Amino acid sequence: DTGVSQDPRHKITKRGQNVTFRCDPISEHNRLYWYRQTLGQGPEFLTYFQNEAQLEKSRLLSDRFSAERPKGSFSTLEIQRTEQGDSAMYLCASSSPVVWGTGANVLTFGAGSRLTVL
Amino acid sequence: AQKVTQAQTEISVVEKEDVTLDCVYETRDTTYYLFWYKQPPSGELVFLIRRNSFDEQNEISGRYSWNFQKSTSSFNFTITASQVVDSAVYFCALSTRSGNTGKLIFGQGTTLQVKP
């Protein structure tokens, strides 16, 4: 297994354009998470999926953001009408099902997709 | 509220020095996990350790050691005999049982620079 893959690694766009990021998780992981990381800060939770179901969305995820995981495998994160404040690193992570007591929820992260909005 | 605080923004040491990275957490849950991740310049977060709230035993792995103290809500990370390759941003994170989401709440990170 090659780990969590994210594409593209870098995206430069003009304000107002739409962008889409893709994440391919580890194949046997049914949970997938999106995080956003701005310069000098820790990653902030955006949303997560269990299989194809989106189970939680942060209030950071405005109406311009949408995430999908149509077949419970790869996921996409789309940002519509980008703003300069959207410039950040978008991180994807995946994990096995959470089993409290065994701690089977170590998140494996991808290398991220860096977005720059001009 | 759940929160992780890493008060040290940047630490600079000379190679072979020992260094401790501090982490303080807040949660009302009695069942939770604490994590440390390393983020090298390449950007990918690398898992280092996970501890559950019921196990306060300290752990050592090579040059790395972790001190978990529930009484002070701290989970500190010590690197012994630091090396240049240890230069990275280190994040402490918390995962609680509430909602069974498995999501991590990260601290702000500590940038460690190890000079030769």
Image (cartoon, rainbow, N blue to C red):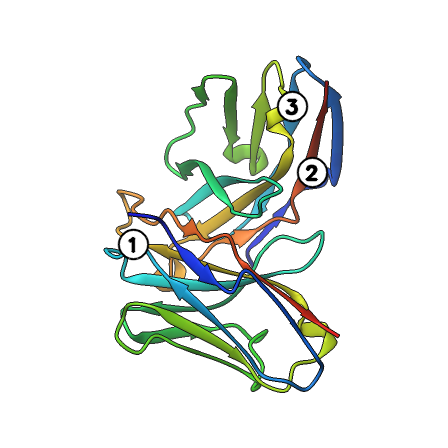
Residue B108: give x, y in percent of width and height: 66, 49
Question: What residue is disc 3 on?
Answer: B84
| SS label for mark 1 | loop
Q: Is residue A60 above or below residue B6?
A: below
Residue B56: give x, y in percent of width and height: 43, 29
The quadrant the C terminus of chain A occupies is bottom right
> Which of the two residues, B27 or B81, is positioned nearer the viewer here?
B81
Q: Residues within 10 Å of mark 1 (few under 14, many from 20)?
A: some
Residue A102: give x, y in percent of width and height: 26, 42
Of mark 2 and mark 3, the one earlier in the sequence is 3
> Which of the two residues, B19 or B75, is positioned nearer the viewer here?
B19
| SS label for mark 3 | helix
Residue in the picture at 28% in, 67% down: A73
| SS label for mark 2 | strand
- Asked whether, in this view, residue A104 is left or right of residue A114, the answer is left
Image quadrant in which you'd find residue A80: bottom right
Amino acid under label 2? Thr
Q: What mark, if any, has residue B111 been given in the picture?
A: 2
Q: Residues within 10 Å of mark 2 (few under 14, many from 20)?
A: many
